[in-house]
Amino acid sequence: MKLFQYCLFFLGLTFFGLGNAIAVKVKYIGLHPWEVLNVALYQHFGLTIGTWGVICGLVLIFISLFIARSYISIGTILNALCIGPIMDFFLWLDILPKATNTWIDYLILLSGIIITGIGGGMYVAAGIGAGPRDGFMLSLSDKTGLSVSKARVIVESFVLVIGLFLGGPVFMATFIYTFIQSPIFQRSLKIFKGVKERVSTQNVISFKKKPSNDGLKL
């Protein structure tokens, strides 16, 4: 069962990184607030977009350790370390569709959002641990008494302002990103939780059917 969970988890991270990479290819339309910040940092200070994603993730984990460390797990750390390099890898391959400056770019962005939403549902459903951003939102919610949704709005608005100040790609899609991605994430989470439960049930049944050697005479 653990093997299946980790396979689902890393497959989810791969999808998430791929979706982010696709969205970055048409970034002039607008990106998710966190990616706006990562792109802005990359444009100002170099490194790669994925590297800044890793740095921001590790900073959030460090802060969460002092707020509510119960939300930090091995999955949180793996999430912070893996998604950025996966995104950079797909960008480095240079096989993703490029911006055309036509309506097709909106379809490209939509595909990126859908893939990211599916990936997010997959890695959360795996049950290995929340991502650094989700863990930070939960930690902040516990510490302040705010609802998770309000904590998310406050944090992402703050991140967006910083990204905008640094010249990050803020446009129409930035403000509708969550409204598209969240329903896809919720649907994906429900589907893959069901898959995980079926695999778990199947393993239990298989284990019970294994012949026992307890009754053998030596």
Image (cartoon, helix red, strand yellow):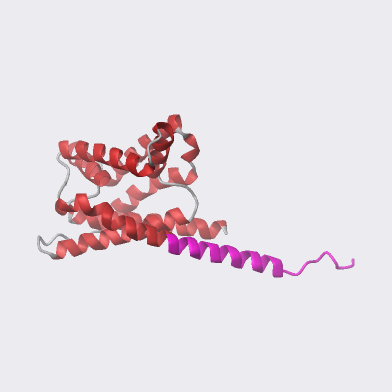
Give the residue at the far right of this rendering: 218
Labels in figure, total: 0
Q: Is residue 160 left or right of residue 12?
A: left
Above or below, comparing residue 6 to residue 201 in the picture: above
Task: Please name the predominant secondary structure of the magenta segment in the image.
Answer: helix
Nearer to me, 40 or 131: 131
Q: Is residue 15 at all visible to an observer of this figure?
A: no
Instruction: Give x and y (percent) for residue 11.
Output: 42, 59
Percent x, y for residue 110?
A: 23, 61
Residue farthest to the left, as pictured: 101
> Closer to the camera, 198 or 179?
179
User: Split into 4 quadrants, where in the image is the C terminus?
Assistant: bottom right
Q: Position of residue 183 (x, y in %)?
A: 33, 59
* Quarter of the image where the N terminus is located: bottom right
Q: Is residue 192 magenta?
A: yes
In the image, residue 107 lies in the stretch drawn in magenta: no
**Which quadrant would residue 16 be assigned to in this image?**
bottom left
**Res. 216 in view:** yes
Q: Position of residue 22 (x, y in %)?
A: 24, 58
Q: Is residue 77 left or right of residue 25?
A: right
Look at 36% across and 50% down and name the residue there: 83
Region in magenta:
190-218
Q: Residue at x 27, y 55 (%)?
A: 179
Relative horizontal placement of residue 196, taking residue 111 as reference (left or right): right
Task: Using the image, determine if residue 8 lies above or below residue 131.
Answer: below
